[in-house]
């Protein structure tokens, strides 16, 4: 074998369908060998004994630099993606909001150009379809965007005031078109008519504290929307992906359809797996915990873990929006006005490792499926991303299972002073992150420079998609 650029030696490697103490050889940006490399020579050898080596995390849900509900995070793409890399993520799938009058392709290209200047990890996106005034244009835009290499789209069933809420007929048309083109529709599933209707009633009655967030949008508001979305998925045959599912019932609804072979997938988020609606009180603290769907109950948390472990939930997305404390405080008077969303991209992989693998006995294989492989399979990045195999990009993360880490904002690197996990500590943290053969993080020190991340063209493969479980 010719001289390698990099060897990762003796780690516990989580490969596709196997876990073994072995070596990985890298040449240029690619993995070229998996297996013993005892006699190989290399420019650099990383001793990975005692570490767990996984394919770089793929975050299927971030919102870097999103302007939303009157606020825009101060965190820029470089700061946000450095934090993601420190936390073990090497590819992100963001969202490109379409402005009114803008084509889907223009929105997509604009965001990918911005990411190209600053991102330190590889990236792609999904345009948020939000100009419904000319659906012919939307249909054309979907085709153009897919030809550009972005096969996923995002539709919201709520957020009327943001101008994003699509009705059932719009959703139907988008999903039918996605089926025709071979794309996938990702859906924020909350019934906007009832959820926002109830929100208005609470506010009208002077019930404006954060605790009413969960009461205005109880489980059934999300479940109703999920049911509608999967029914339209069945009528149209569209590949469908429910984002940030939070209820104990939601993935069970979807599982019935998956059992019949429908290409419907579910994502949850670390915060729904850890935090409850008890955080809403006292109101001074509750304002920081406004996200949608709302945080739920302890029973939901355990049901989501079970769904994730047994394969009814396929991915974990961070839903990262790096609002600061003061940005939440600015809108504190009425819970419906507080910008929704949390920072979370840095802690996504470590929280699933600690809460899943260490505390709940989740297998390493399943851990890798939900933080990396399945997102690659669903969004058309596999096998370039999401797997440790010859020919794949050498995106690798070494996790030190014994490293303890506080989740206080001062110990994290996201561009915000807010951590919704303040006071929590976990065990297991990445000690090294490698992007396409280059060590970009070592012991939480970022070693690269802004702009080293690349846009990854994607195309969904039917068979690969169905292997996401
Ligand atoms: O509360 C959330 N999830 N904010 C970000 C936007 C979205 O709905 O995904
Ligand atoms: Zn959403
Ligand atoms: Zn989101």
Image (cartoon, rainbow, N blue to C red):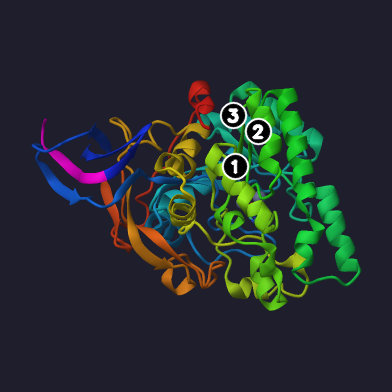
Look at mark 1 in the image and give the residue it sits on: 307
Residue 26 image position (x, y, % from top left)? 22, 39
| Whether residue 134 can be seen here | no
The residue under the point 44% across, 37% down is: 373
Residue 362 image position (x, y, % from top left)? 47, 45
Report the number of discs: 3
| Whether residue 19 can be seen here | yes
Cα–Cα span, label 3 and label 2: 21 Å
Q: Is residue 324 on the magenta stretch?
A: no
* Mark 1 element type: helix
Q: Quadrant of residue 40?
A: top left
How many other residues sit within 10 Å of disc 2, few (<14), some (14-19) or many (≥20)? some
Of the numbered discs 3 and 2, the one sitting upstream in the chain is 3
Q: Nearer the viewer, residue 362 or 172?
A: 362
The residue under the point 53% across, 71% down is: 422
Q: In which quarter of the image is residue 135?
A: top right
Q: In the rendered image, which quarter contains the N terminus?
A: top left
Rendered view: 184 above or below 86: above
Say which of marks 3 and 2 sits in front: 2
Of the numbered discs 1 and 2, the one sitting upstream in the chain is 2
192 sits left or right of 439 in the view: right
Residue 417 image position (x, y, % from top left)? 52, 73
Residue 189 image position (x, y, % from top left)? 72, 44
Can you tell me whether the CB of the residue at mark 3 lies under 8 Å from the nearest atom of ligand 2?
A: no
Look at mark 3 in the image and give the residue it sits on: 183
* Mark 3 element type: loop
Look at mark 2 in the image and give the residue it sits on: 255
Q: Is the residue under label 2 in contact with that under label 1 (CB below 8 Å)?
A: yes
Cα–Cα span, label 3 and label 1: 25 Å
Q: Give the range drawn in magenta.
A: 1-11
């Amino acid at each position: 074998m010719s001289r390698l650029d990099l060897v990762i030696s003796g780690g516990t490697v989580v490969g596709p369908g196997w876990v073994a103490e072995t070596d990985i050889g890298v040449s240029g940006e690619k993995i070229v060998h998996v297996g013993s490399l005892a006699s190989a020579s290399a420019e650099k050898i990383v001793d990975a004994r005692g570490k767990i080596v996984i394919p770089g995390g793929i975050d299927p849900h971030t919102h870097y630099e999103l302007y939303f509900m009157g606020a825009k995070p101060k965190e820029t793409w470089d700061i946000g993606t450095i934090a993601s890399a420190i936390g073990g993520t090497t590819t992100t799938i963001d969202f490109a909001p379409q402005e009114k009058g803008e084509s889907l392709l223009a929105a997509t290209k604009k965001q990918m150009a911005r990411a190209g200047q600053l991102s330190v990890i590889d990236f792609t996106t999904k345009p948020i379809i939000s100009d419904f005034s000319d659906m012919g244009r939307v249909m054309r835009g979907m085709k153009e965007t897919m030809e550009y290499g972005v096969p996923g789209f995002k539709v919201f069933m709520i957020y009327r005031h943001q101008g994003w809420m699509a009705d059932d007929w719009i959703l139907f048309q988008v999903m039918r078109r996605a089926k025709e083109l071979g794309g996938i529709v990702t859906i924020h599933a909350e019934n906007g008519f009832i959820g926002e209707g109830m929100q208005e009633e609470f506010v009208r009655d002077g019930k404006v504290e954060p605790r009413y967030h969960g009461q205005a949008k109880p489980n059934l508001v999300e479940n109703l929307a999920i049911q509608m979305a999967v029914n339209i998925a069945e009528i149209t045959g569209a590949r469908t992906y429910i984002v940030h599912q939070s209820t104990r019932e939601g993935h069970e609804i979807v599982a019935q359809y998956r059992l019949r072979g429908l290409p419907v997938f579910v994502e949850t988020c670390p915060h729904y797996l850890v935090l409850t609606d008890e955080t809403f009180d006292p109101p001074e603290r509750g304002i920081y915990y406004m996200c949608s769907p709302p945080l739920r109950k302890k029973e939901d948390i355990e049901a989501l873990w079970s769904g994730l472990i047994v394969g009814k939930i396929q991915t974990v997305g961070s839903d990262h929006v790096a609002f600061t404390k003061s940005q939440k405080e600015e809108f504190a008077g009425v819970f419906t006005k507080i910008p929704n969303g949390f920072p979370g991209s840095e802690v996504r992989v470590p929280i699933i490792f600690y809460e899943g693998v260490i505390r709940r006995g989740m297998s390493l294989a399943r851990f890798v499926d939900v933080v990396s492989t399945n997102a690659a399979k669903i969004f058309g990045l596999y096998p370039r991303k999401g797997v440790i195999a010859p020919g794949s990009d050498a995106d690798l993360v070494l996790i030190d299972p014994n490293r303890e880490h506080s989740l206080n904002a001062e110990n994290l690197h996201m561009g915000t002073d807010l951590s919704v996990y303040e006071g929590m500590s976990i065990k297991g943290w990445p000690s090294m992150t490698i992007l396409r053969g280059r060590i970009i993080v070592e012991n939480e020190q970022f070693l690269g420079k802004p702009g080293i991340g690349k846009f990854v063209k994607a195309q969904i493969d039917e068979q690969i998609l169905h292997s996401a479980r």
